[in-house]
């Protein structure tokens, strides 16, 4: 395991870039190594990656993006179909000059990054995907669409948010460093004085989801890129196809991270960072960590 001194590492710088008539926020950890682009999933931001990024930043150029409707990027009422998300990602990479990047993405971000890699050959040199939805269909869309109109959970202070997450059944397993980062960077103070999380309910609007179905299995086979497919040991999903990627895809590697749920990079950042180092270097990985 690679050790690091958090007190010796600088925090990232934040930047805005204008693409496709919106502003996208990203954080840049600096460095002169091979570029790594980190992309979050639904209801998260670039800062959910901080604990992983700190461990990679000494040796790589690490950039993490706030997708449209998340974090400090623009929150638009529409624009969340996969084709539009892919166009956002491609335009961002063009704007900041990313080519042959190592793409690392989680959940919905993994779907977007895979589709972008197919559409823009040469943009990514390899992909590390953490539990993307391999098949996105009407069942999935309707399962998550209710979040658009669900009542928002809010908190009176960041300390109250910290306590809530610390005791939450899912978030209680996050690494303490991740928990601090989320409280510090993924929440904002609303005009009414309450704290809320930085994601727009419009990201789940059904108008953008109707018919927006995807099957990644044939795309994995066609990409001709090294792919690391990372699964958690305990996550259970209603999308059974998540675990049904066929065998025999060249340079397709599977890894299970033990003692984690769907947000495995937020729970075991050291293990994820070490796995990424091995994958980038082309070294062999065990089937489980």
Image (cartoon, grey):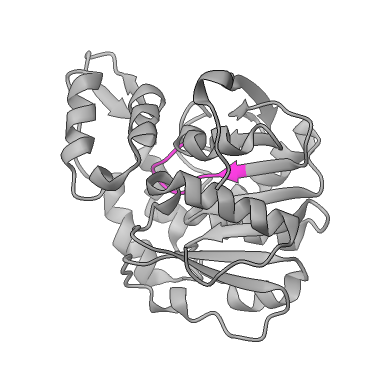
**Segment colored magenta:** 38-45
**Position above or below: 45 against 217:** above
Q: Position of residue 194 (x, y in %)?
A: 21, 19
Task: From the viewer's side, name the closer residue of 258 and 2.
Answer: 2
**Position above or below: 266 against 232:** above
How many numbered marks does the figure carry? 0
Report whether residue 76 is seen: no
Report whether residue 95 is seen: yes
Q: Position of residue 10 (x, y in %)?
A: 59, 19
**Position above or below: 60 against 124:** above
**Position above or below: 250 against 43:** below
| Residue occupying the point 71% across, 36% down | 59
Figure quadrant of residue 111: bottom right
Q: In the rendered view, does 157 fall on the left or right side of 27?
A: left
Q: Is residue 24 magenta?
A: no
Task: From the viewer's side, name the closer residue of 116 and 31.
Answer: 31
Q: In the rendered view, does 245 fall on the left or right side of 170?
A: right
Q: In the rendered view, does 23 fall on the left or right side of 46?
A: right
| Residue occupying the point 32% across, 57% down | 144
Q: Position of residue 193 (x, y in %)?
A: 22, 13
Figure quadrant of residue 93: top right
Figure quadrant of residue 198: top left
Q: Position of residue 267 (x, y in %)?
A: 37, 47
Task: From the viewer's side, name the closer residue of 68 and 30.
Answer: 30
Instruction: Look at the magenta stretch and give its main secondary structure.
Output: loop
| Residue occupying the point 59% across, 43% down | 38
Task: From the viewer's side, name the closer residue of 145 and 164.
Answer: 164
| Residue occupying the point 71% across, 50% down | 102
């Amino acid at each position: 395991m690679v050790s690091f001194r958090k007190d010796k590492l600088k925090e990232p710088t934040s930047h805005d870039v204008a693409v496709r008539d919106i502003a996208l926020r990203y954080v840049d950890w600096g460095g002169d190594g091979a570029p790594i682009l980190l992309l979050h999933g639904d209801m998260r931001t670039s800062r959910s990656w901080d604990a992983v990024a700190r461990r990679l930043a000494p040796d790589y150029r690490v950039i993490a993006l706030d997708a449209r409707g998340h974090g400090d990027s623009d929150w638009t009422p529409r624009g969340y179909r996969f084709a539009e998300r892919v166009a956002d990602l491609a335009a961002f990479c063009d704007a900041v000059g990313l080519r042959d990047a190592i793409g690392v993405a989680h959940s919905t971000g993994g779907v977007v990054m895979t589709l972008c890699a197919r559409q823009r050959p040469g943009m990514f040199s390899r992909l590390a995907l953490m539990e993307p939805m391999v098949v996105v269909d009407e069942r999935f869309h309707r399962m998550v669409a209710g979040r658009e109109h669900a009542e928002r959970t809010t908190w009176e202070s960041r300390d109250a948010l910290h306590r809530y997450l610390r005791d939450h059944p899912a978030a209680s397993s996050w690494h303490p460093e991740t928990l601090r980062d989320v409280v510090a960077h993924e929440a904002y103070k609303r005009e009414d004085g309450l704290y809320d999380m930085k994601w727009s309910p419009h990201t789940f609007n059904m108008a953008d989801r109707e018919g927006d179905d995807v099957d990644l299995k044939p795309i994995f086979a066609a990409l001709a890129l090294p792919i690391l497919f990372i699964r958690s040991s305990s996550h259970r999903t209603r999308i059974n196809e998540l675990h049904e990627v066929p065998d025999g895809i060249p340079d397709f590697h599977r890894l299970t991270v033990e003692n984690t749920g769907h947000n495995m990079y937020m729970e075991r950042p050291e293990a994820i960072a070490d796995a990424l180092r091995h994958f980038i270097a082309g070294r062999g990985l065990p089937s489980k960590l």
